[in-house]
Image (spheres, helix red, strand yellow):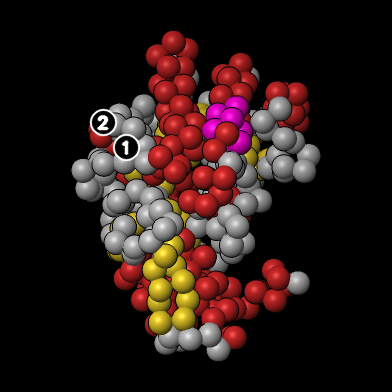
């Protein structure tokens, strides 16, 4: 077990959606010295800023959450940025962590690293069985290199790097900007805005037939802290809820919870993305005792309530 109460922890992305929850769970677990290299002060794509972050933070443990991330639309629009920025952040942070004799490096990967046609449920051993889905392959592959780098550094330097693969997250505080949001906040915004305006229909991307698995953000934060404390093996680990839902059923559920009763039009000129996504979550339960606790309907209710409470300030 890694005792985090007396360790200096550098948490990249600590002011982001997931990061704020990870901070809370680290503090609950006894961590008292958390250094967050805020993006306005440290651009972790640039090597001098990475050097400065390590000089300022002097970490014993690094948890790397920071990422350039978004939904299908922005992944298609900016594949080069998504590849380069995520690759450079990860590679430089891990190299400096090694040079500074950091005791543990926790890499947060992505379900987008899996091949497009992975057998369902996705098992960690299938990570290399094909090429990722094209719309998010540059992002998925850049994040997948953290696994390769971590295993290579473990082999050559005895460096303790672990790699976690969370599914799509959602929850209060998510990104609701339609230009870059993921599917749940995008659909919540569509439905809530339609109810407010009295619209009789909404348009959704794709056919609705693709499936996804979702994990409530607070569950994800708890998983990351559990792994930081209790996991030190080279094998990648899925972090998910073990549920699967089609985008069509998801939108119908969100429409029900938001009170939208109009028509749903599917724009099949837009991509569905990966055909199916659902994880085998047994390894996380076996290796460090993580299972998701938040029911999907309840998690959606909380997310919708948060959006309704904060939407004016976000749009103003």
Q: Main secondary structure of the magenta part?
A: helix
Image coords of residue 250 (percent x, y): 36, 69
10 Å neighbourhood of mark 2: few (<14), some, or many (≥20)? few
Q: Is 226 included in the stretch rendered in magenta?
A: no
Image coords of residue 294 (percent x, y): 38, 66
Q: What's the CA distance linking mark 1 and mark 2?
A: 6 Å
| Quadrant location, the C terminus | bottom right
Mark 2 or mark 1, which is nearer the start of the sequence?
Answer: 1
Q: Is residue 173 above or below residue 289?
A: below
- Identify the element where label 1 is drawn: loop
Whether residue 113 is visible: yes
Pointer 2 residue: 129
- State the residue lying farthest toward the top: 156
Figure quadrant of residue 249 = bottom left
268 relative to 278 in the view: left or right: right
Circles 1 and 2: CB atoms closer than 8 Å = yes
Q: Is residue 261 above or below residue 175?
A: below
Nearest the viewer among 206 and 251 is 206
Residue in the picture at 37% in, 41% down: 133
Residue in the picture at 61% in, 24% down: 92
- Identify the element where label 2 is drawn: loop
Figure quadrant of residue 243 = bottom left
Image coords of residue 307 (percent x, y): 58, 73
Image coords of residue 108 (percent x, y): 48, 39
167 relative to 193 in the view: left or right: left
Pointer 1 residue: 115
Residue in the picture at 55% in, 58% down: 181
Report the span colored magenta. Answer: 81-88
């Amino acid at each position: 077990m890694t005792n985090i109460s007396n360790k200096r922890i550098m948490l990249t992305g600590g002011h982001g959606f997931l990061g704020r929850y990870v901070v809370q769970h680290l503090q609950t677990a006894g961590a008292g010295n958390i250094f967050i290299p805020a993006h306005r002060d440290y651009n972790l794509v640039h090597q001098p800023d990475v050097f400065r972050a390590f000089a300022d933070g002097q970490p014993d443990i690094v948890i790397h959450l920071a990422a350039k991330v978004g939904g299908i639309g922005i992944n298609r629009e900016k594949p080069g940025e998504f590849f380069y920025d995520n690759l450079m952040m990860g590679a430089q942070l891990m190299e400096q962590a090694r040079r500074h004799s950091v005791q543990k490096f926790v890499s947060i990967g992505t379900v987008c690293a899996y091949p497009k046609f992975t057998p369902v449920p996705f098992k960690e051993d299938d990570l290399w069985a094909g090429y990722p889905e094209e719309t998010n392959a540059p992002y998925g592959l850049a994040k997948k290199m953290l696994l390769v780098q971590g295993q290579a550094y473990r082999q050559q330097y005895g460096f303790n790097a672990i790699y976690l693969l969370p599914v799509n997250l959602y929850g209060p505080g998510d990104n609701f900007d339609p230009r870059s949001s993921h599917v749940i906040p995008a659909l919540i915004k569509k439905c809530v805005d339609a109810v407010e305006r009295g619209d009789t229909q909404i348009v959704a991307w794709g056919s609705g037939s693709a499936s996804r698995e979702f994990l409530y953000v607070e569950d994800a934060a708890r998983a990351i802290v559990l792994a930081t404390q209790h996991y030190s093996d080279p094998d990648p680990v899925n972090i998910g809820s073990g549920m699967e839902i089609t985008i069509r059923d998801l939108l119908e559920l969100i429409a029900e919870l938001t009170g939208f009763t109009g028509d749903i039009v599917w724009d099949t000129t837009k991509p569905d993305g990966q055909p199916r996504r659902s994880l085998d979550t047994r390894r996380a339960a076996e290796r460090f005792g993580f299972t998701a606790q938040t029911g999907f309907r309840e998690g959606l209710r909380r997310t919708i309530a948060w959006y309704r409470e904060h939407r004016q300030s976000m749009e103003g």
